[in-house]
Image (cartoon, grey):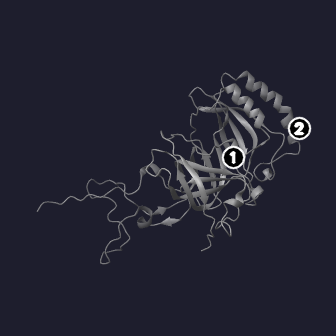
């Protein structure tokens, strides 16, 4: 008999390599969508994951096979306290086409606990006031060279009793012309922004987060490699040879290593509801490992990466679907999650 050739599916995607721990627990937005908006607004909103529950929705799309029927789906609840606009940056392109910061402008007011991130000098306000006019002049003179503005945003987790230390995030301003975006930045600097000013109910968002860390794991848990029979030599949860004898080169093979605590992006999550009274969605006894939501919240369809209390960035969709889903939220399950 001739040699019997065996086939096996590839285990793991090379798109996610190297599978190492991220350097920061704050997710990084690597690309921004080109959106067409009548008025300028920020293209992302940072919030915190509270937990997961069940939602009863009605599909109001008349072409749907479940049109008019109530369906139980998984939904994620996000705690979304207001964010503070500390300042903004103007970006130009260098001779190679890469973005380069031209100048930045900071607010006279600074949020609470910001000194846990930055070193604030005693004469901060005098320095900011003295540089505002000079920086405005620089922006106006180079307005034809500026390609985009990004807001310097600080989260306010202390408003919801989560922790004291805030996070800094850079968020791009989209919509309108550069002149209109500049005026928009001047309006929002030093002010608080709420979820409804950025995101609308019924739209899609991309969820950027750091996944739950699972430490160093073997190939069975990390890649789903088949467990060998109990009579196997040298272990059951091991892989075979890591490479053939000929050709004498090292091929890709599943190996043990870090699992979880990676940055991941999930595209096109439907926003079911945005509210300002968190008690109406908090289950009895509070969310596990999180507690009670008191104020602003966001409900998304489906699950999202990361554990409770993880910082989540909701970004405008970079590849939105052609057809929009039309789900009407009927009720949220608020039964106790304590078991």
Image quadrant containing the N terminus = bottom left
Residue pictured at 61% horizontal, 47% vertical: 314
Taking 241 as reference, is 217 left or right? right
Q: Is residue 304 visible?
A: no
C-alpha span from label 2 to label 1 = 32 Å
Give the structural element (helix, strand or loop) at label 2.
Answer: helix
Judge whether 191 appears above or below 273 on screen.
above
Image point (30%, 58%), residue name: 8
Q: Which residue is tagged 2? A: 126
Residue 58: horizontal and vertical position, in percent? 54, 53
In primary-sequence order, the first of circles 2 and 1 is 2
Residue extending farthest to the left is 1
Q: Residue 141: horizontal and vertical position, in percent? A: 73, 21
Which labelled disc corresponds to residue 335? none
Mark 1, Cα crowd under 10 Å, few <14 / some 14-19 / many 20+, is: many
Q: Secondary structure at mark 1?
A: helix
- The image shows residue 179 at horizontal and vertical percentages of 70, 25
Count the marks: how many? 2
Task: Sort mark 2 into few (<14), some (14-19) or many (20+) by Cα contacts within 10 Å.
Answer: few
Q: Quadrant of residue 6?
A: bottom left
Q: Is residue 65 left or right of residue 142?
A: left
Q: Are marks 2 and 1 in contact (CB under 8 Å)?
A: no
The residue carrying mark 1 is 195
Between 116 and 53, which is closer to the camera in this rendering?
53
Residue farthest to the front, as pictured = 68
**Is 290 displayed left or right of 264 in the figure?**
right
- Residue 124 visible within the image: yes
How far across and down, in percent of the image, does residue 202 sit?
58, 45
Q: Residue at x 73, y 26 (%)?
A: 139
Nearer to me, 45 or 228? 45
Of residues 262 and 159, the one drawn nearer to the viewer in this rendering: 159
């Amino acid at each position: 008999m001739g040699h019997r050739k065996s086939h096996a599916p590839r285990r793991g995607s090379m798109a996610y390599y190297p599978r190492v721990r991220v350097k920061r627990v704050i997710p990084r937005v690597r690309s921004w969508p080109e959106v067409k908006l009548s008025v300028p607004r920020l293209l992302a909103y940072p919030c915190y994951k509270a937990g997961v529950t069940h939602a009863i929705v009605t599909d109001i799309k008349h072409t749907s096979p479940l049109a008019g029927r109530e369906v139980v789906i998984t939904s994620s609840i996000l705690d979304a306290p207001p964010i503070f606009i500390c300042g903004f940056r103007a970006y130009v392109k260098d001779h190679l086409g890469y973005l380069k910061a031209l100048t930045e402008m900071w607010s006279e007011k600074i949020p609470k606990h910001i000194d846990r991130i930055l070193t604030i000098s005693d004469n901060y306000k005098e320095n900011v006031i003295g540089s505002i006019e000079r920086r405005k002049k620089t922006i106006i003179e180079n307005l034809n060279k500026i390609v985009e503005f990004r807001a310097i945003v600080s989260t306010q987790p202390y408003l919801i009793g989560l922790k004291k230390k805030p996070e800094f995030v850079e968020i791009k301003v989209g919509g309108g012309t550069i002149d209109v975006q500049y005026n928009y930045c001047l309006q929002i600097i030093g002010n608080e922004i709420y979820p409804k000013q950025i995101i609308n109910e019924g739209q899609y968002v991309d969820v950027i987060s750091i996944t739950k860390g699972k430490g160093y794991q073997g190939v069975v848990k990390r890649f789903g490699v088949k467990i060998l029979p109990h009579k196997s030599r040298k272990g059951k949860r091991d892989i075979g040879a890591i490479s053939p004898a000929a050709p004498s080169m090292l091929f890709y093979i599943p190996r043990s290593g870090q699992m979880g605590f990676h940055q991941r992006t999930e595209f096109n999550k439907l926003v079911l509801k945005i509210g300002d009274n968190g008690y109406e969605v908090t289950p009895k006894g509070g969310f596990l490992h999180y507690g009670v939501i008191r104020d602003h919240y966001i409900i998304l369809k489906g699950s999202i990466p990361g554990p409770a209390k993880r910082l989540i960035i909701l970004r405008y969709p970079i590849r939105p679907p052609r057809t929009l889903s039309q789900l009407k939220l009927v009720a949220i399950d608020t039964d106790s999650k304590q078991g």
